[in-house]
Image: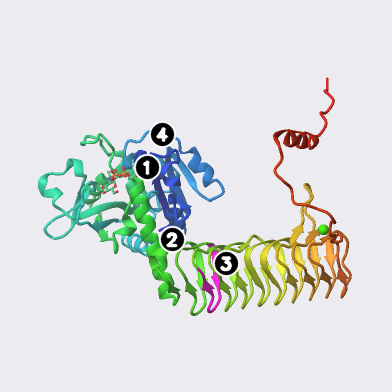
Amino acid sequence: MPLSIVILAAGQGKRMRSDLPKVLQPLAGRPLLQHVVDCARTLGADAIQVVYGHGGERVREVFAAQQLGWALQAEQHGTGHAVMQAMPAIPDDHLVLVLYGDVPLIQAATLQGLIARAGERSLALLSVMLDDPTGYGRVLRDNAGNVYRIVEQKDANRKELAVRESNTGLMAAPAAAIKRWLASLRNDNAQGEYYLTDIVTLAVRDGFKVEAVVAPTVAEVLGVNDRLQLAELEAEYRRLQARALLEAGVTLADPARIDVRGQVRCGRDVSIDANVVLEGDVALGDRVVVGVGCVLRNVSIGADTVLHPYSVLDGAVVGERCSVGPFARLRPGARLSVAAHVGNFVEIKNATLGAGSKANHLTYLGDATIGDQVNVGAGTITCNYDGVNKWPTVIEDGAFIGSGTMLVAPVTVGRGATIGAGSTITKPAARDALTLERSRQQAIDGWRRPVKASAEERDRHVAQARLPDEPAKD
Ligand code: UD1
Ligand code: CA
């Protein structure tokens, strides 16, 4: 059967105590709802309908660029009422899978199992065995083990409350039957709500097969209602990601102190120290070493490269056998060729550093093309911005840039050129020559060290340093 997925996301999330709608709260850097949508996408559904609620316009805005259907549930009268809002958009011959926008760690394999057990004449629901099922609906089975009802906590008697098998809320059933069942739901229960769970009884009455699939792990069906639960799921997510890296052969100094918020591909014998954050698409080559506290976002790092502690790389491509940091910052468009060295307090943006080239200390290289075997001295700055435009700097192979050099772009330093320390370079520097821009050093005869000024001397001296007043404008 073709598949439609309904994601319930109309809940307010009061207990988050936040101005942000609950399903927009971030887990591993992505909104809760995004995790559910991403998982849903892998199931090959024809359509995904999100049921959103009062104040949910922000949710729609955040997801505006994504292929999703939206159904407004203006007032919240329960989960059955919520699903009802999405049904008009769903064809009768579809299978409907109901997910929750605040249950972010749900696994595709679990949902595939659920879908496989639902069909023309069968309803499948996902249950979970909980040590403490307080607050959950209980899955009631007859003596033969067949599910016949779900009873909510608030409607349950003492015997029913003792049942540990709990309803996750996620279920799958054919659209035509769901429409029929929902139309006959009543709200004469403890909460005065239209319960989606009541369709279980209706399905049994219609002679449907009702199956409860037990979720393989508790974490994947946990919902987020408050900050504590959000933090717990963040930790769970961290554990899952760390385990995947360990299984892939990566050494982690401490699996509890790495945050993976994207996709990571690692070669063999990669080693990652504590408190590292990986975001977006990260590719680490064989034997790459990532030092303490590094933050990597959308980067590719070549084999045998070492990232020393506290380096921040975003949108950078680093070649093999490079050395980066400690405390280096590579911004988008930074490209390091093989065996390049970037040291402490060096910032590189939209610039290429050629093979074996070095910028080891306190430097800014922006909008620059730097050849092979170039040495960039400490404190060198490409002055790439004139306040309006960005201009390029070119440094050819084998050049030596003395410390404290200002390269006022656009400017070119020729192959094999040497720039004397402290120069401000505004014109092309010739190949294989020494270029210097520096005033002559002088010794001042008869100079004495200052002595303490009297109050009057001080006032006079300060007054002399003032600019004359500007003429008044009328
Ligand atoms: C529901 C189930 C319960 C199950 C529990 C699991 C029903 C009647 N009960 O409980 O058996 O154990 O989930 O967490 O279905 N929502 C809407 N609109 C509404 C009401 C809810 O969109 O009018 C959404 C919420 O945003 C949330 C989900 O539905 O994502 C579940 O709602 P929630 O109130 O957390 O669950 P319960 O109804 O208490
Ligand atoms: Ca100078």
In the image, 217 versus 474, the foreground residue is: 474
The answer to which image quadrant residue 402 occupies is bottom right
Q: Residue at x 34, y 40 (%)?
A: 15
Q: Is residue 174 left or right of residue 454?
A: left
Q: Residues within 10 Å of mark 4 (few under 14, many from 20)?
A: some
Going by the numbered disc 1, the residue's amino acid type is Met
Q: Which residue is mark 1?
A: 16
> x, y percentage for residue 384?
77, 56
Instruction: Give the CA separation, mark 4 to mark 1.
Output: 20 Å
> Nearer the N terminus, badge 2 or badge 4?
2
In the image, 213 versus 173, the foreground residue is: 213
Q: Residues within 10 Å of mark 1 (few under 14, many from 20)?
A: some
> x, y percentage for residue 276?
48, 64
> Nearer the N terminus, badge 3 or badge 2?
2
Q: Is residue 296 magenta?
A: no
Mark 4: C-beta under 8 Å from nearest atom of ligand 1: no
Foreground mark, 4 or 1, reads 1
